Image (spheres, grey):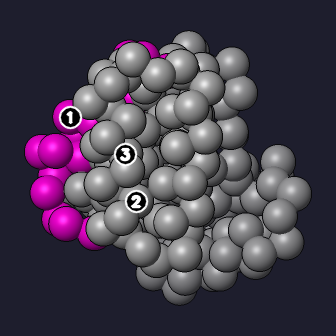
Amino acid sequence: MESLSFYENQFIKADSLISDGNIADGKELLEDILSQYPDFGKAHNHLGWIYYNKLSNHDKGIFHYKLAMKFEPKYPAPYINYTYLLIDLGRYAEAKEHVEFTKQHLENFDDSSYNSELGRMAEYESQYTLAYNYYRLAKKNALNPNFIDNMNANMKRVKDKMSIFEKLKLKLNKQ
């Protein structure tokens, strides 16, 4: 059995292949890593991403994200990726529970990203005032100018969906 360091380097190569759009070779390399180190959480996260985003295999995506969180509990990527997956599947109650769990257990919890996702769920559920407030919170702690622009666009879109009464209530609460 080769050293873990070798497989960490292989993981970096797999990550680079995936970033370059060579998903098949990246996937193969990740599977090789996991055949030797089945508890390599970062490899599970990347496989989860491939299965969900590239192969539309939700079950395998969930499986690998859960293993990533189990084996690499301080690695933030699988937590947010699992959130995206649950929301995309319309499993909002599970997603909200997962966000709350993540907020309590992940040291480097990214308020902006999770508030954005809570806003997305609220918007899907036609809770426009709540969505607006989550997007505003996401923007408040954000540093990335593109993310901030996206939150502004989300807030405008949600505001356009609001009834006149919701807009009035929003305006009154700002003062």
Residue tagged by mark 2? Answer: 26
Q: Which residue is mark 3?
A: 30
Instruction: Report if residue 102 lies within the magenta region.
Output: no
Q: Which residues are magenta?
A: 54-72
Please state, as top left, top right, bottom left or bottom right, where the N terminus lies in the image: top left
Q: Are marks 2 and 3 in contact (CB under 8 Å)?
A: yes
Looking at the image, tell me whether mark 3 or mark 1 is earlier in sequence order.
Answer: 3
Q: Position of residue 125 (x, y in %)?
A: 30, 59
Question: Alpha carbon of mark 3 to alpha carbon of mark 1: how far?
Answer: 15 Å
Determine crowd level at label 3: few under 14, some 14-19, many 20+ residues with C-alpha closer than 10 A: many
Q: Which residue is mark 1?
A: 63
Secondary structure of residue under mark 3: helix
Q: Say which of marks 1 and 2 sits in front.
A: 2
Judged by depth in the image, the label closer to the viewer, 3 or 1, is 3
Up the image or down, 137 lies above or below 128; here it is: above
Marker count (numbered): 3
Asked whether disc 1 touches disc 2, contact meaning CB atoms under 8 Å apart, the reply is no
Name the residue at 78% across, 69% down: 148
Q: CA distance from mark 2 to mark 3?
A: 6 Å
Q: Mark 1 or mark 2: which comes first in sequence?
A: 2
Q: Amino acid at mark 3?
A: Leu
- Residue 101, position as x, y percentages in the image: 45, 20
Residue closer to the observer: 165 or 36: 36
Judge by depth and name the residue closer to the eye, 16 or 164: 16
Magenta-span inclusion, residue 66: yes
